[in-house]
Amino acid sequence: MFSLNDSNRFFLYPFPTDMRKSFYSLSGIVTNEMGMNVQDGDAFIFINRPCTSMKVLHMECGGLVIYHLKLERGSLVLPSSLLETKKPLETRWSDLIMMVEGISLEHAKTATRWKPDKC
């Protein structure tokens, strides 16, 4: 339980989401609007219109888990590529952490690293 890490795949939903939605409603968005299966083990990220709240839906061994972040001050920084497309955006664990920390992805520079073929 509580096992999000860099080995997961993360998909950012490209539209504002009502944060009153819970397990079944968010699962419905994943299935019906994103065309994906929540039971595949991927993590699905949903953000509200003012970018002050984020929910991450993830299927783990015991069932569905929702991680909910509500910012007291400031807003989440979204990737500009999300604004250009209306499709779910696959993102990395490091990008999710930068969004949560308020670091602009456009100004951040990533050093080149070796990755095995499995990644």
Image (cartoon, helix red, strand yellow):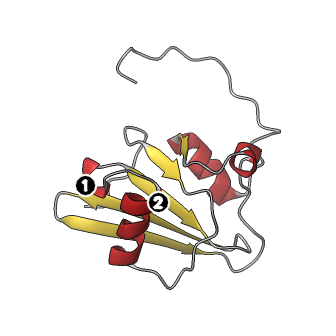
Name the residue tied to disc 2. 33
Does 118 appear above or below 80?
Answer: above
Q: Are marks 1 and 2 in contact (CB under 8 Å)?
A: no
Give the mark nearest the N terminus, 1 or 2: 2
Q: Residue at x 43, y 40 (%)?
A: 6
Of all residues, the one furthest to the bottom in this rendering is 20
Q: Dot 2: what SS? A: helix
Q: Position of residue 108 (x, y in %)?
A: 77, 37
- Rendered-image quadrant of the N terminus: bottom left
Q: Position of residue 101 (x, y in %)?
A: 67, 57
Does 110 appear above or below 13?
Answer: above
Sort mark 2 into few (<14), some (14-19) or many (20+) by Cα contacts within 10 Å: few
Find residue 2 and report its image quarter. bottom left
Q: Position of residue 64 (x, y in %)?
A: 27, 67
Q: Residue at x 41, y 70 (%)?
A: 26
Seen from the viewer's position, the closer of residues 104 and 19 is 19
What label sits on residue 39 in the rendered view?
1
Q: Residue at x 40, y 15 (%)?
A: 116
Does 42 appear above or below 71?
Answer: above
What label sits on residue 82 in the rendered view?
none
Between circles 1 and 2, the one closer to the viewer is 2
